[in-house]
Amino acid sequence: MQVRKRKRLLNQRMIIEQAVELLNEGGLDNLSLRKLADRLNVSAPSIYRHFADRAELNSAILDTIFFETLDSIPEHTDAATWMQAFGEALWRMMTQVRDYARLLLVTVIPPEHVAFIIATVRARLEPLSMPTEEALNLQSSIQALLIGWAAFLQSPI
């Protein structure tokens, strides 16, 4: 009796993990759905079942990285230590993922998803000892500053 190899089921998480590896190896210009399919040893249409196009994949990569960053921040009771931990975690992620800042700059994130991300961050900030809107503005400022520094750091100039 012949033993059949079980195919591993392709899922979004696997695709995103391999996409980040491709990104780290060759940068944003090296990331394509075809190269990703080759790397996963599947046909390109298999990738398209999970992501309609490269823009949707880019958005999912950003999403995964950002929420991993948020999840890595331990609980804090005051805004200052949370903001510092957020900045450190985000910077760590930006320096670990090649072209992360550039990916942020070229990816269009749908407004409804931006609203979801803001609501998630707001929920994390509400228990802190700072008015939520002020904390949200500070968090956004830290993020913008780090994106700018990461883009500058990874610039070929």
Image (cartoon, rainbow, N blue to C red):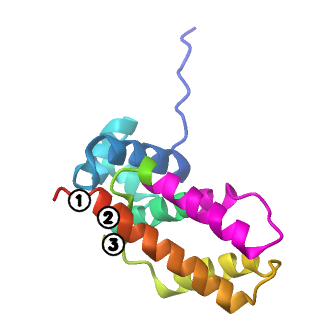
* Front in this rendered view, residue 107 or 72: 72
Work out which residue is located at the far front of the displayed protein and give it: 80
Mark 2 and 1 residues: CB-CB less than 8 Å, in contact?
yes
Q: Are marks 3 and 2 in contact (CB under 8 Å)?
A: yes
Q: Earlier in the sequence, mark 1 or mark 3?
A: 3
Residue at the disc numbered 2: 151
Three-letter amino acid code at the position of disc 2 = Ala
Residue 51 vs residue 57, the one in the foreground: 57
Task: Work out whether mark 3 precedes mark 2 in sequence or the reverse, and give the earlier one.
Answer: 3
Q: Nearer the viewer, residue 149 or 70?
A: 149
Q: Which residues are magenta?
A: 67-94
The answer to whether residue 36 is visible is yes
Left or right of 18, for residue 123: right
Under circle 3, the secondary element is helix
Cα separation between marks 1 and 3? 13 Å
Q: Position of residue 90 (x, y in %)?
A: 53, 60
Tag 1–tag 3 contact (CB < 8 Å): no
Q: Quadrant of the N terminus?
A: top right
Under mark 3, the amino acid is: Leu
Disc 3 marks which residue?
105
Quadrant of the rendered image containing residue 68: bottom right
| Mark 2 Cα-neighbour bin, 10 Å: few <14, some 14–19, many ≥20 | some
Instruction: Say which of 98 and 3 sits in front.
Output: 98
Inspect the image, locate mark 1, and give the three-letter code of the amino acid beneath it: Ser
Which secondary structure is most common in the magenta stretch? helix
- At numbered mark 1, what does the secondary structure look like: helix, strand or loop? loop
Q: Quadrant of the C terminus?
A: bottom left
Does the image show residue 52?
Answer: no
How many marks overall? 3
The residue carrying mark 1 is 155
